[in-house]
Image (cartoon, coloured by chain):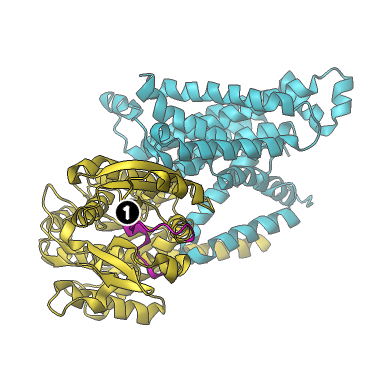
Chain colours: A cyan, B yellow
Amino acid sequence: MRLSKQATLLVLAALIVVAPIFFPSGYYFRVGSLLFVNSLAVVGVVILTGYAGQISLGHAGFAAIGAYACALAPVHLHVHPSIAAIIGAVLSAVVAYLVGRPILRLKGYYLAVASLGFGILVSMVLANEIAITGGPDGIKVPELGLRAVLADWGLELTNAQFWYAFSGLVLLVGSWLALNLYNSPTGRALRGLHESEIAARTVGVDVAQAKLVAFMISAVYASVSGSLLALQNRLITPDIAGYMHSIEIVTMAVLGGVGSVLGAIFGASILTLLPQLLTVFQEYEQVMLGLVMMLAMIFMPRGLLPSIVGLVRGRGE
Amino acid sequence: MQRTIISATLASVISFGLTGIAAADIKIGATVSETGPASFLGDPEAKTLKLLVEQINAAGGVKGEKIKLFLYDDGGDPNKARTFATRLVEDDGVVAIIGGTTTGTSMAVMPVAEEARLPFISLAGAIEIIDPVRPNTFKTPHTDRMACEKIFDDMKKRGLTRIGMISGTDGFGASMRAQCLDVASKYGITIVAEETYGPKDADMTPQLTNIRSKSDVQAIINPGFGQGPAIVTRNYAQLGIALPLYQSHGVASNGFIELAGAKAAEGIRLPGTALLVGEMLPESDAQRLVVMAYKTSFEKATGTPVSTFGGYAHDAMRILVDALNRATSMKPAAVRDAIEKTSGLVGTTGTVTMSAKDHLGLDLGSFRMLEIRNGSWKLVN
């Protein structure tokens, strides 16, 4: 049932390119770009949770590092916002290393707890260091400038269209890297330790090291998604580091099917689009989301996409 | 079969959503924080907007056309607020946006409105929303700077010049603290002691003891919002501090007196809007009629007492409808021009007169200095 790497990328690219034909207004580009930004963070979770079987409840903290890097580095270090995003990604990897190195030597769910604490810590720092971060009211983020360059070349895009295309492109690259990783020696090691740590160790996999690499890679994914969000919103507030945002990222991945990139993106789509569809019943939004999630977990424990594919092929659960 | 049912259900849900949007004449958009941490602001705002639209439509609408309100709940999340603003502009095709309950959500909506050249009336306090003035952004609440000025003005009248300040580290408290520090010297006020507390702190006794230990402190000001000021007030009474205590307009609601206790809150002064003291205003007061009309209808419709925050939404809708009535066309640019020409419009926060340089249109006189006496509000001057 697993699509090949090329097929997955093709399906994804086709969806990104074809979807705008059906967009009745510019608002759908905005929702689309949010969807891609969320998907990118979720693809990171696929690597960490889907491949390596580890759970992080602090990914919003990394998203916040990426986002605030884009706000602060151009002001304090006088670098271009794109460089700032890279600084954020490197910083996230370093922080992930520091958090993960002692924790991932232990077996069990310690990473979940440690990352949970880390996420809360980031959110507290952002809200309280008002002189640097602007506090709860947030901070402005400089313009990326790429849209103006494109306009010079004769490609006039609205803000929403540009961010749709740009985040779509980044998501494609991110998915490509994640799919490559799947079949690489590291990816095999990760999947091996997911099945059985002892077995993986006996065939010579450095389990702690492999988990650490997965954690760092997924932190970079979250960081880049945070940067993209900050750059397109031009304003970032500590809400991005909120505990609920971490939970949201994990839920998206698990709902769609944490084992596959396409499944995770499917989950991200549902949880990004559903609140937009449900504004008619806004009071019941949380209830509906909870219901969808519970039903999915009870009847489709492998996640929506794998279960649906299974149904279509007539194999059921 | 199963899939047919699912797709049929989906299709009907989607088409239901679309038909709900179709029949409308003048479309007004709003995104407020009905849920989430700022819901005690956003909830009365949403109720007020719905109520006013009902009233206006029942009275024949604007220029004979009915108003259709597109109201979204952003939960206090700026990212959601921005998405809803985009939706209002691009998909719903509204002529103006009201909302942005908090400063964060307002700052998120602003770029969308400015890019689309659509008038946007914010309901948040911070001065940065309208300073510098942006062509399409307006707001209704007094700024925190004005609250500081009103308090310092009153202190000066009472001969209090050396004060202590205890502020919350939340967005509201931090912003007002900065403005108070900035404006203090203008009123000859010296801040001799300063303390802060976190939004979740449950006891401010140590900070208050520190301030009290400075022998020459004559009064204390507490820029803050939510529970913090109520705890400060209770601790203040427990410590038996006899200095005058000033709270901010952020706690100008009956909920504050209930939370702090009428006994502890006795004698506290704070700048508030006329809405809290509607019955006490003299018959000659221009605001009395407006305030009482809003108060009566809101309390009848919702069964809950009015709050200052619902008043902000009330004023925003009044300003917008007034502008729609005067505008040369229903195009956003014409409505924007009309809003900027708002003159002498009486709202709950004050009498609004805007100009190209002033997108708030309120002066200090529209703030009322209130004092808590026997568990209710009293006008000071």
Residue at 40% across, 66% down: B265
Is B240 part of what is drawn in magenta? yes
Q: Position of residue A301 (x, y in %)?
A: 75, 50
Residue at 44% across, 59% down: B240
The reply, left or right, for residue A231 in relation to residue B278 is right
Choose between B199 and B355: the one closer to the eye: B199
Q: Position of residue B323 (x, y in %)?
A: 15, 63
Q: Which residue is mark 1?
A: B124
Choose between A101 and B84: the one closer to the eye: A101
Choose between B291 and A237: the one closer to the eye: B291
Residue at 23% across, 51% down: B152
Is residue B238 in view from this perspective? yes
Q: Position of residue B24 (x, y in %)?
A: 29, 68
The reply, left or right, for residue B336 in relation to residue B4 is left
**Residue numbers of the magenta segment:** B238-256
Q: Chain of mark 1?
A: B
Q: Is residue B141 above or below residue B325?
A: above
Q: Quadrant of the N terminus of chain A?
A: top right
